[in-house]
Image (spheres, rainbow, N blue to C red):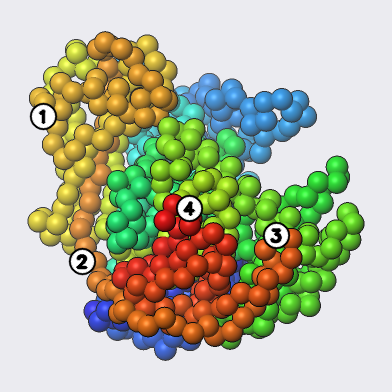
Amino acid sequence: MRRVGVDIGGTNTDIVLIEDGAITLHKVPSNNSEPSEAVYRGLGEMGTSVSEVELFAHGTTVATNAVVQRRGARTGLITTQGFRDVLQIRRTTRGELYDFQWDPPAELVQRRWRREIVERTTARGVVSVEPDLEQAVAETQRLKDEGVTSVAIAFINSYRNPANEQKVKAHLQERFPEMSFYASAELLPEWREFERTSTAVVGAYVGPVLTDYLHRMVASLQSEGFSSDLLVMQSNGGLGTADSVVENPVASLMSGPAAGVIAQAEVGRSVGIPDLVGIDVGGTTTDISVTLDGVPQMRSEFEVEFGSVVGVSMIDIDSIPAGGGTVAWMGPEGLLRSGPRSAGAYPGPACFGRGGTEPTLSDAYVVLGRLNRESLLGGAMPVYADAAQQVIGELGDSVGLGAERMAAGIVELTVANIAAAVRRKTIEKGVNPRELGLVAYGGGGPTLACDVAEELEIPCVVVPRYPGLTSALGLLLTDIRHDFVVTHLERSDETSADAVRDAYAPLRAEGDSHLAREGVPEERRVFALSADLRFVGQTHELTVELGEVYDDAVHARLGELLAESHLAAFGHAPKGNPPVEIVNLRLAAIGQVDKPELGGIEEGTQPEPIGHRTLWTGSAFQEVPVYARTSLGAGTTMSGPVIVEQDDTTTVVLENWTLEMHASGNLVLRRSSQS
């Protein structure tokens, strides 16, 4: 069976082909103006016939980039009379609490494109005022005349009864078939007006862009003879068909990074380390995530940028601007800064010879000897060390430092930024990073993994078999998954297990229907339940996993389960047995798919280095051996400092660290003092 996983990032497009257990990898520069072009260019360079591919899984940043770069559809909002400014009021919080000059990002929908109509549904879900359909038509016509092509519909209390939204959407679709319409209760049937309205607006903003992109890709694949469904990675760590993703475009906002976390969990399982923090260091960003007991941590909300909130079940990933292309610069106060600007794929870092003239992290690596000063990608990509030396040296000259000291400063600043983000992801959530392993992937992760681990006092680092293509590989290790939610405000002591089970029933039926449409056999359908719970009197809730069946035993343990989650999240929990309030019920419908067997590697003799390179060790250059990763057999061990090269990354093993090649093909690095 021929399977292809494609992950399109901001800098590179990664492609993994698995056929009969054999893995072929390829990486090409992304084409940000036409992302699919890089896919076909890469497949062509691999000599792959699309007509022979049976499973095509795809991760993309199209939806996220549309918001961040403000390249989405011109969007309007139709809402209940009196609720026009929900988007602008937001949560009444500020992104920069003490900066009185700070202005939040502009709303995705300008105020002149936010229109009100007469309609009303009560808090109990009773339609007290039918929607004025002709008023909705008139307002939509005005929006269309101003160039709006996509419209979000968000009415008060529609989570309790979506009838008014459905009527207006159906009527407008009939009158304006050339426009796109997104109803808030279809994307997020939860209470809280801002979150639901924001989710609908983000969906309307990115929906047409994502729809056009996926439809073009599907058409192109079909024209080449591809006959199966295109599967798209979703933020929840599961795959969905292109058609299902189009129906709920916000579900793919963290598509590519989510696949990496799935692979991260598999890497941990293969080396026997179930508790991990992962750093996926790409060309533009570093994505940080945690897996505990082999399970990726999840969250139910994501803020793409301040004020653009999406309520969607997703793997808990934080991103910071720290990648190989991140530009280093001196701030007006004379302090070294890094990011958020990136050189991207073009012009890219100066060392890659594509016209880049600004100092980046990759240029610092070349100056310090962390990267090969002649070529990368197995010799396919030339490296221009003199250009790197020049741009880093010019930055150093501005503050009286040599190129080596400045390059070391850039690396140290990047390590500090990543370590700070890891602390936010772990310590602030009750997890001790010293008790975790660190999985380092992406093209740049293994190059600074030991530095980050030293900073965080993490004793063990795991470098996957194919670090630069881990996210693409994760696409082929993923099940189909769809998440559903409904608000169900009840005190647990005032309702019964039967009532809660009845509320779950429509979610299960909807999930079952989705999996059936995607051809998942009944025996491969799994349903996982969870609920957003809080103690009575609290304002916010925690998501608690409940297993596959909701019965009397689970209902009786809600307080205990919430207390455990509360203790893990905040370090304390209420004493006694305070009453619990159920807020939202969640169901994940999972379609299990066959996963490829990756296999391990054979034992080998102690290899010979392929060369030596001078590596900056903090105060001076030291000559260290360089090994090809392909020469390391299972059981191979060596002590740092040492450099291991492969086509998609370079692993730098620092002094006082040891390296062992695990039988799974993953590198395991340990601090000597912990051996």
Tell me: residue 216, above or below residue 98: below
**Which residue, given by chain and number where applicable, does mark 1 sit on?**
551
Using the rendered view, name the quadrant where residue 109 is placed: top right
- Residues at badges 4 and 3 in contact (C-beta under 8 Å)? no
Q: Amino acid at mark 1?
A: Asp
The answer for how far apart the CA atoms under marks 2 and 4 are is 41 Å
Question: Which one is earlier in the sequence, the residue at label 2 or at label 3?
Answer: 2
- Label 3: which secondary element: loop
- Label 1: which secondary element: loop
Comparing labels 4 and 3, the label whose residue is closer to the camera: 4
- Label 4: which secondary element: helix
Comparing labels 3 and 1, the label whose residue is closer to the camera: 3
The answer for how far apart the CA atoms under marks 1 and 2 are is 31 Å
Q: Position of residue 339 (x, y in %)?
A: 70, 52
**Which residue, given by chain and number where applicable, does mark 4 sit on?**
673
**Which residue, given by chain and number where applicable, does mark 3 sit on?**
618
Tell me: residue 500, above or below residue 381: above
The answer for how far apart the CA atoms under marks 3 and 1 are is 60 Å
Q: Which mark is residue 594?
A: 2
Question: Which one is earlier in the sequence, the residue at label 1 or at label 4?
Answer: 1
Residue drawn 41% across the image and 46% down it:
436
